Image (cartoon, rainbow, N blue to C red):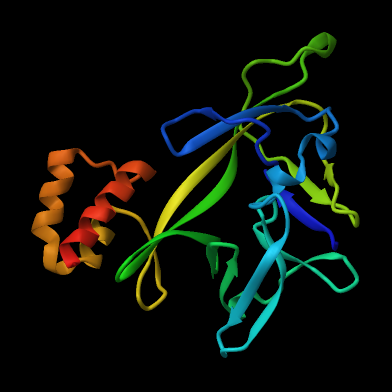
Amino acid sequence: MKKFILFVSLWLLGSYTLLGQNSKFTKITTGDNLAKKIPNNQKYQYPAFNAGTITYNNGTQAAGKLNYNFLLDEIHFISPQNDTLSLSDEYLIKMVVIAPDTFYYQAKIGYLRVIDYFKPINLAVKQSIQVLRNGKQAGYDQNSAVSAIRQYSYYTDANGQLKKLEPKGNLLLVKENSYFIIDKNRLVHPVSKATLLNAFPLYKNEITAYIKTNKINVNHEKALLQLLHYCRSLTN
């Protein structure tokens, strides 16, 4: 596979609740063998490449064994030569279907995975990795507990192995789930109370009352799905 430069692109080796429902974090020692510590089932959406279909904006389709790579934010496929390659020219892609999931590509955001359909909108999620802090090397191989937030760069070599470009130190990595609405025109909007009300203009009063009564936090997936199921019931 060709080389890619990544910024803060280590996947999570374990998951613990942090900063609310939509955040998970883990601590990683950069001096360890990162390539061995991050198995494929942590790098990819699925444990194995699955049959999938790529639909382009001009209506043409291509089929193959596909998977979504969290580290690179790319759709990968297995070539006839059994190489792992990534899709290029994402702006030409209308959608990618892998197993039960549908992915859309949005410039400056990346791939969005559809969680559920709530006519006339789709709810999608974007997962990202951020660094909250890193433990710098102090004296005698001890790590300081507090240090400034900084970026670390990694790349994958020709064999798909993760290589570090920074010295030793501990990273605190956070997986954040961000939610988006995809409207009937395939326009993407970050989830907010305003975008939800605009998606269901005939029921603004009912939705506003429901949010207030049930104290809905639209940034939490469980509450967001609860609200959207209610919105869908209004249109039936």
Number of labels in the image equals 0
Quadrant of residue 26 within the rendered picture: top right
| Left or right for 185, reference 142 | left
Q: Residue at x 90, y 54 (%)?
A: 159
Expressed as whole percent of the image width and height from the top left, the position of residue 93 reads 59, 78
In depth, the one of 41 and 219 nearer the eye is: 41
Q: Residue furthest top?
A: 140
- In the displayed structure, 170 sits above or below 222; it is above
Expressed as whole percent of the image width and height from the top left, the position of residue 162 reads 82, 45
Expressed as whole percent of the image width and height from the top left, the position of residue 226 reads 28, 47
Question: Can you say which quadrant of the picture contains the C terminus?
Answer: bottom left
| Left or right for 193, reference 29 | left
Q: Note whether residue 93 is visible.
A: yes
Quadrant of residue 4 within the rendered picture: bottom right
Expressed as whole percent of the image width and height from the top left, the position of residue 137 reads 77, 19
Question: Can you say which quadrant of the picture contains the N terminus?
Answer: bottom right
- In the displayed structure, 170 sits above or below 109; it is above
Q: Residue at x 78, y 46 (%)?
A: 154
Q: Residue at x 57, y 90 (%)?
A: 58
Q: Note whether residue 133 is visible.
A: no
- In the displayed structure, 57 sits above or below 114; it is below
| Left or right for 155, reference 199 | right
Q: Residue at x 79, y 34 (%)?
A: 37
